[in-house]
């Protein structure tokens, strides 16, 4: 039986996969019992959505950019006729070795452990997860291993927390396991508040059972009796599929009382967050679960001793837990074979920004930044120059293209002044103003500051005020030292990790793009022609065909001219809204 699979994650649905799914459903309904239609999560190729896969006899043909019209062709020519439509094939996979198609070069450098089932199974069917080896790790952990052996296996694998800090996971589990107080809790941080990050959402949408299974194994290891998945309410698809998965796991006896006859009891509930960035910090997250305002607590005591409800608690993020079943099933040595000496395994990254092929990629630790941007990401849009990449979100830092050979691991990235964070990578080209980029991220962290500590609450506001002045052409030379001084003090004196890392985008752009700050302050010029207050909009008379569309769209009546003659922009009247650039089909309007 041929199986037809449509990508039905958030990225697929946003691109129109529902229409393709419905059309295929209509066509396949005329052949009852002959074909199977189902949905799947994100395979990582968000830039090629909607995706439709035709699977038969171990061969997977994945079509990209599937419209309802193309879906009809796929039905007629491939599903019924058995002829692959080569010009629309994104991936053609036979078994585990042969990979062809336009996207094959981007897939080959990847190693899928966390994403092993995403795009492969229907996330709403527990039978498909079990068919892919799901819950075998749980059986092994509960029926064949002691808690001490589980922790040792995770330690030996070298798995480090994938939420940003990179703390050794097995060691963290051992701290909670050594506590005598009861009850104990397992928490999964699925808050994922970084702009440009969507790794955790995609895993929960595409393979929620892997996270659930990892949490149960962790609970067995530390002796926890209850778990919480803290997921932001802005992830409705993730919450829906996680809910379905939890209900299915309960019905199968994987959670609840006396799991698999082992005598071990464990329950999991979902707590929806309200989208506060600070609740990505674990102690603030605990406060939110407890029904309080999400604000960080002073440490020590640490969560392993007094976390949720002041009881021993282990907190990891979605990606960390999703690794656990694979490690238990395949062994610590198999996992440790990937990556570097101090950064074992793989890492999932979300590629966003000015990269051609935005989406998800899972690669062995230690892969250079350039490989992620060019080999997997397809390079920079419109053939422009690679300028920098922001890693770690607002808490991270900006790494220039000159450091593109830097390996992506827990040692090399911090050496640049950035952090790996949870895996968001925002790629920037030569049209990006680094001062404005720093201002953008600081504006985000300033708005999201919980306000508990003075340095974060007031310090980030003062830095934001300075950056805003600079982008308006009102900066003074003394502003540079003020930014550095404020940034270092905020780093040293803020209570939580989010406050301590808030100045990173500013300090790293000062380190690597100092000349752009000087141009803004001394020359009152934005080298990237991006800061509206420092640029003028002009018309290239050689390119202008005199269509007059720019004049019609100008809200300030700043554009004048006659039909079939070059138009002119009055820079005094111009409000720099950029509408003229958007509507011009001949690239005749430019910024200077």
Image (cartoon, rainbow, N blue to C red):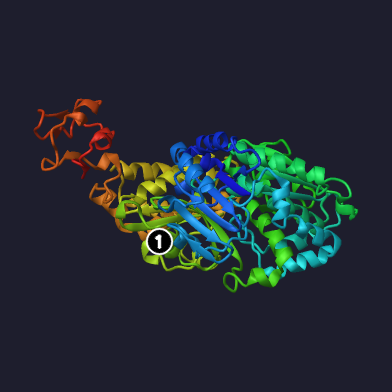
Q: Position of residue 114 (x, y in %)?
A: 62, 57
Q: Which of 344 and 398 is in front in this view?
A: 344
Quarter of the image with the C terminus is top left
Residue ID at (58%, 46%): 5
Residue lying farthest front? 81
Q: Does 44 sit above or below residue 37?
A: below
Residue ID at (47%, 37%): 68
Question: What secondary structure is marked by label 1?
Answer: helix
Q: Is residue 305 visible?
A: no
Q: How crowded is mark 1: few (under 14 residues within 10 Å), some or many (20 or more)?
A: some
Which quadrant would residue 387 be assigned to in this image?
A: bottom left
Q: Where is residue 135 in the image (x, y as percent from the top left)?
A: 76, 55
Q: Nearer the viewer, residue 100 or 271?
A: 100
Q: Position of residue 430 (x, y in %)?
A: 31, 54
In the picture of the structure, the residue carrying the numbered disc 1 is: 374
Q: Nearer the viewer, residue 56 or 457?
A: 56
Which quadrant would residue 554 be assigned to in this image?
A: top left
Figure disc tally? 1
Give the left or right position of residue 156, taking residue 40 as reference: right
Q: Position of residue 379 (x, y in %)?
A: 38, 58
Residue ID at (38%, 61%): 400
């Amino acid at each position: 039986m041929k199986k037809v699979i449509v990508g039905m994650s958030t990225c697929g649905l946003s691109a129109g996969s529902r229409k393709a799914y419905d059309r295929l459903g209509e066509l396949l309904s005329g052949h009852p019992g002959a074909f199977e239609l189902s949905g799947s999560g994100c395979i990582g190729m968000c830039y090629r959505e909607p995706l439709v896969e035709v699977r038969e006899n171990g061969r997977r043909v994945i079509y990209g950019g599937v419209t309802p019209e193309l879906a009809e062709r796929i039905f007629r020519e491939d599903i019924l006729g058995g002829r692959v439509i080569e010009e629309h094939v994104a991936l053609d996979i036979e078994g585990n070795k042969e990979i062809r198609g336009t996207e094959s070069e981007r897939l080959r450098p990847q190693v899928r452990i966390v994403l092993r089932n995403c795009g492969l199974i229907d996330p709403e069917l527990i039978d498909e997860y079990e068919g892919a080896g799901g819950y075998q790790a749980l059986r092994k952990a509960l029926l064949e291993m002691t808690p001490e052996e589980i922790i040792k296996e995770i330690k030996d694998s070298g798995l480090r927390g994938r939420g940003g800090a990179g703390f050794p996971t097995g060691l963290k589990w051992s701290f909670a396991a050594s506590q005598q107080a009861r009850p104990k809790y397992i928490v999964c941080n699925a808050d994922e508040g970084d702009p440009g990050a969507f790794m955790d959402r995609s895993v929960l949408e595409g393979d929620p059972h892997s996270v659930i299974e990892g949490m149960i194994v962790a609970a067995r290891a530390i002796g926890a009796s209850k778990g919480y998945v803290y997921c932001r309410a802005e992830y409705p698809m993730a919450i829906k599929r996680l809910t379905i998965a939890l209900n299915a796991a309960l019905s199968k006896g994987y959670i609840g009382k006396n799991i698999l006859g082992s005598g071990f009891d464990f329950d999991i509930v979902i707590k929806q967050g309200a989208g506060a960035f600070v609740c990505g910090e674990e102690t603030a997250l605990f406060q939110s679960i407890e029904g309080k305002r999400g604000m960080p607590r002073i440490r020590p005591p640490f969560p392993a001793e007094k976390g949720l409800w002041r009881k021993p608690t282990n907190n990891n993020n979605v990606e960390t837990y999703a690794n656990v079943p694979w490690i238990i099933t395949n062994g610590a040595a198999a996992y440790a074979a990937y990556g570097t000496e101090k950064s074992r395994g793989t890492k999932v990254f979300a590629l966003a920004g000015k990269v051609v092929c935005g989406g998800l990629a899972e690669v062995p630790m230690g892969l250079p930044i350039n490989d992620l941007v060019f080999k997997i990401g397809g390079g920079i849009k419109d053939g422009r120059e690679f300028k920098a990449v922001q890693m770690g979100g607002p808490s991270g830092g900006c790494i220039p293209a000159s450091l593109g050979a830097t390996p992506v691991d827990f040692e090399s990235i911090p050496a640049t002044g950035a952090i790996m964070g949870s895996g968001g990578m925002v790629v920037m080209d030569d049209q990006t103003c680094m001062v404005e980029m720093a201002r953008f991220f600081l504006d985000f962290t300033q708005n999201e500051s919980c306000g508990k500590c003075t340095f974060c609450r007031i310090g980030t506001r003062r830095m934001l005020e300075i950056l805003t002045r600079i982008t308006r052409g009102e900066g003074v030379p003394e502003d540079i030292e003020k930014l550095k001084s404020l940034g270092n003090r905020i780093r040293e004196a803020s209570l939580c990790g989010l406050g301590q890392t808030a100045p990173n985008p500013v300090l790293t752009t000062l380190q690597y793009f100092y000349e752009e700050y000087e141009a803004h302050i001394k020359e009152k010029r934005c080298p990237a022609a991006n800061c509206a207050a420092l640029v003028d909009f002009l018309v290239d008379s050689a390119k202008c065909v005199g269509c007059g569309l720019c004049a019609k769209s100008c809200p300030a009546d700043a554009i004048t001219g006659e039909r079939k003659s070059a138009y002119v922009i009055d820079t005094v009247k111009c409000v720099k809204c950029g509408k003229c650039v958007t509507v011009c089909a001949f690239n005749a309007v430019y910024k200077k």
